[in-house]
Image: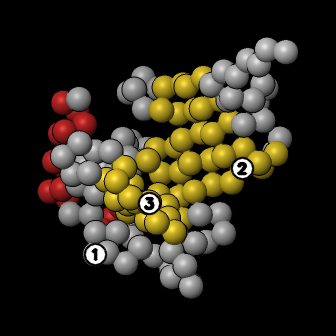
Amino acid sequence: MPFNYVTAFSYDGKGRLIQIDGPLAGADDITTFDYFGATSDFSADFLKFINRKKSPTQFLTQEAGGYDFWGNPTSLKEPDATFTCLTFDAARGYLKNSTENMAGQTSCSSPERGRSPDQVDPRFRAAADAVHAAR
């Protein structure tokens, strides 16, 4: 009996990933990605939420809560209110490390982590926006 697993990736006009559908048939394994809006003080290219479909009407949502110089999320607040801390390679932008906070930690502990968008230095935000525009 042959198996056919297909995963479809959807992108918006800016080239940002907005949906992953698959590999299961139907719409039971959709993941969507939401970004900051153009009216935000933060870059519209920065990830805000990851929504993983749990049931036909419910999603499990992770919220990005901090960003590195290049706009990669450095912390994700999980649906159970714990945090996943992410570290990206500064030169190439790939994910180097992912850790789960435990024992009641309420944020990622590094000074560069856990910042809300309004706490990021505007000079860094402008530099990251310039890099994203050049890509």
Above or below, 99 against 14 in this view is below
Apparent side of residue 36 relative to residue 71 in the rendered image (left or right): right
Q: Tell which circle, 3 or 2, labels the residue nearer the N-terminal end.
A: 2
**Neighbour tally class for label 3: few under 14, some 14-19, many 20 plus, Cα within 10 Å:** few
Q: Tell which circle, 2 or 1, labels the residue nearer the N-terminal end.
A: 2
Which residue position is annotated with label 3? 98
Q: Residue at x 18, y 56 (%)?
A: 124
Q: Residue at x 39, y 70 (%)?
A: 114
Q: Are marks 2 and 1 in contact (CB under 8 Å)?
A: no
Which residue position is annotated with label 1? 111
Task: Point out the frontmost of discs 1 and 3.
Answer: 3
Q: CA distance from mark 2 to mark 1?
A: 30 Å
Looking at the picture, tell me which residue is in the foreground, 15 or 88.
88
Apparent side of residue 95 relative to residue 91 in the rendered image (left or right): right
Secondary structure beneath dot 1 equals: loop
Secondary structure beneath dot 2 equals: strand
At label 1, the amino acid type is Pro
At label 3, the amino acid type is Ser
Above or below, 83 against 2 in this view is below
Which residue position is annotated with label 2? 59
Q: Residue at x 23, y 29 (%)?
A: 135
